[in-house]
Image: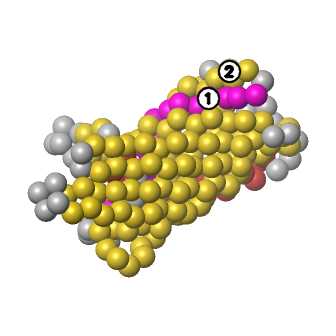
Amino acid sequence: MNKLLSMKKRIVFLLLLLSFSKTNAQEIEGTELGLDLTFVASNFGGTVGLGSKFGIKMGEYLIAGPSVRYQRSWNNNIAAQTKSGFNIFGGGIFAHARFFNAMFVGAEFEYLRSPYTSFGFLTASTQWSSTLFLGGGLSLELNESIRLNAGIMYDIINHINSPLRSQYFMKNAQGFLLPVIYRIAFFFPLS
């Protein structure tokens, strides 16, 4: 299993590297600031967070750059009447290709501080986890000052201590959660 995961990471890294190297010859057409909000809540706890992306538009279709994420999560143990909370933060890179002012496909890699151990339990020590979301969805320029990207992303790394597991929403036939999240982002042109 670890060899397969390692192989997946290498293949995806090489694909990202190749896609970025092809765009070096393209002209930079501007920059954008992307923001995505996270909000999940129930009686048992929740998460609120912000992801920020600084995108460099390379040509007509490709935007790529660094990203930063911060989230605050909390748990309410109703039976024991205890509450706890933790912060998640980290950074990464992203690349999106936009087509026909209607859709996008993309990859988003992030390295995040996680409060979970490799067994999935909360811990007081710092753990780090990587995520690599691939996916796509709707991409619309609403006017000349805002673009909406709304899509479904699949984490191909799916590390056991990923702090984003609480946002997974899809189950397979056996009832196990799949590493799939919704991602809605707004992009604002800077130059």
Q: What residue appears at the point 63 percent right and 54 percent down from the top-left corner?
A: 67
Q: What residue appears at the point 38 percent right and 79 percent down from the top-left corner?
A: 125
- The N terminus: image quadrant: bottom left
Q: Is residue 96 left or right of residue 191?
A: left
Q: Is residue 120 left or right of residue 14?
A: left
The residue at which mark 1 appears reads as 148
Residue 75 to residue 190: above or below:
below
Q: Is residue 130 left or right of residue 17?
A: left
Q: What residue appears at the point 30 percent right and 38 percent down from the top-left corner?
A: 170
Marks 2 and 1: in contact by CB < 8 Å? yes
Q: Nearer the viewer, residue 10 or 120?
A: 120
Q: Which mark is residue 142?
A: 2
Q: Nearer the viewer, residue 184 or 2?
A: 184
Q: Which mark is residue 8?
A: none
Q: Nearer the viewer, residue 69 or 161?
A: 69
Q: From the top left corner, tell me how far across and down residue 35 is, in percent.
A: 62, 42
**Image quarter of residue 175:** top left
Q: Nearer the viewer, residue 106 or 34?
A: 34
Colour basis: secondary structure
Q: Secondary structure at mark 2?
A: strand
At label 1, the amino acid type is Leu
Segment colored magenta: 145-162
Q: Secondary structure at mark 1?
A: strand
